Image: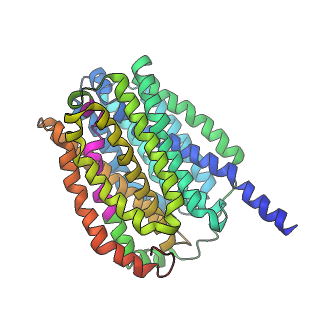
Amino acid sequence: MRHQNKSSRRFNYIIPMIVMAAAGFTFNTSEMIPVGLLSDIGADLGVSEAKTGLLITAYAWVVALLSLPLMLAFARVPYRKLMLGIIAVFIVSHIISTFACSYNMLLASRIGVALTHCIFWSIAPAMIVAVAPPDKRASALSVLVAGGGMALIVGLPMGRLIGLIAGWRTAFGSIGILAILLFILMRMFYPDVNREAETVSRKQLIYDMLHSPQLLMIYLIIGVTITGYYTGYSYIEPFLAQIGGFSESAITWTLTLFGVAGLLGSLIAGECYPRHSREVIIASCFGIPFMLMMLRPAADMNPMILAALCIPWGIAITTLNIALQNDIVRLFPHDSAVPMSIYSGTFNLGIGAGALVGGIATNNSCLGQIGYIGGSIAICTAIFCLMVYIPARRRAFPGSSSSD
């Protein structure tokens, strides 16, 4: 009987985990969709590519600035109720995007989506960990990130394809329809997740966070690395077209390949993090700037080499993201929502900063050099990670694995 109950608990978490992965897919597809339609949106609304890129910057900085305040403001709302509420706002915002007739209207709708993103990526890791058995928490986080990664494999290419065929507004409308289905699934299949595990007071939690050098280092690493990464990635579509000479279909397939690499990265992280977390983090930190630096040389050599470069690039960013989130859960196992909200905000601060740097480079006719610029930024945290963070985390997690 006890064995049956244990088996039942393990089975019961699978459906909610799939639903949450679908949510990650939907939210990440919405976040990434301007990347694939940057040129089309700008041409239709009569604005430059750099100004269209500000949609990415504004979105990211709203998330960066408001993730923690919104998380604290809704700290007493049950997770499931809060999740349903933000999905509803998400749907309304995409309706506005679909009928946007001006740049400012589209920008306002994107800010609405960003507000829901603030809360989603703050509570989603805690929600999926709460329904998973203790020995499956790392795998559950990997599934959530894999769901988000599927946005690059399916969501972004499909959104771009829909946008090219039926217009970018239809692409945003399709995401809204997907969100309606997600709302129904979340309401039907996701259980109430209480916060009984959050035994630490908010005041004590904030104190512990401020006095955790490992946590502060994680924020520094992800913020600066993502700044370098998105300096290149935010403008990857015009880079592939103008520098790489890619056709529209080739760009779509390359973005799909990038997404497949992200999914592969999530599988690698889920499998390797428990035993080789140190190696995963170091390889990812150095892999990102190396791939950025190789963008222009690969474009000059051969389009196939440039496309192939997306595989290790996509693997590196995904494995680093999963590994650092797992480190946060290990540092704060009883209440990871607030640390995760700051992580999400820092991540998006890096997205906004990277899109801004990439936009400045593009405006100054330096589109071909965005990889060098982004790589120079990201290499700084790679060195910091190797020299400072890795020794610090070894002290924080003594004897937890053969790698630590």
Position in image of residue 247 (x %, y %):
31, 22
> How many discs mark residues in the rendered view?
0
Q: Which residues are magenta?
A: 221-240
- Please give left or right for residue 189 compared with residue 390 in the image: right
Q: Nearer the viewer, residue 288 or 219?
A: 288
**Residue lying furthest right in this view?**
1
- Please give left or right for residue 368 compared with residue 288 in the image: left
Q: Is residue 153 above or below residue 64?
A: above
**Residue lying furthest top in this view?**
165
- Please give left or right for residue 69 compared with residue 294 in the image: right
Q: Is residue 44 above or below residue 240?
A: above
**What residue lies at 25% left-to-right and 22% top-to-bottom?**
46
User: Could you tell me if residue 93 is visible in this image?
Assistant: no
**What residue lies at 48% left-to-right and 35% top-to-bottom?**
155
Quadrant assignment for the N terminus = bottom right
User: Could you tell me if residue 55 is visible in this image?
Assistant: yes
Position in image of residue 368 (x %, y %):
17, 37
Q: Nearer the viewer, residue 69 or 365?
A: 365
**Prevailing secondary structure of the magenta residues:** helix
**What residue lies at 34% left-to-right and 29% top-to-bottom?**
251
**Residue lying furthest left in this view?**
364
Q: Nearer the viewer, residue 67 or 166?
A: 166
Q: Nearer the viewer, residue 373 or 197?
A: 373
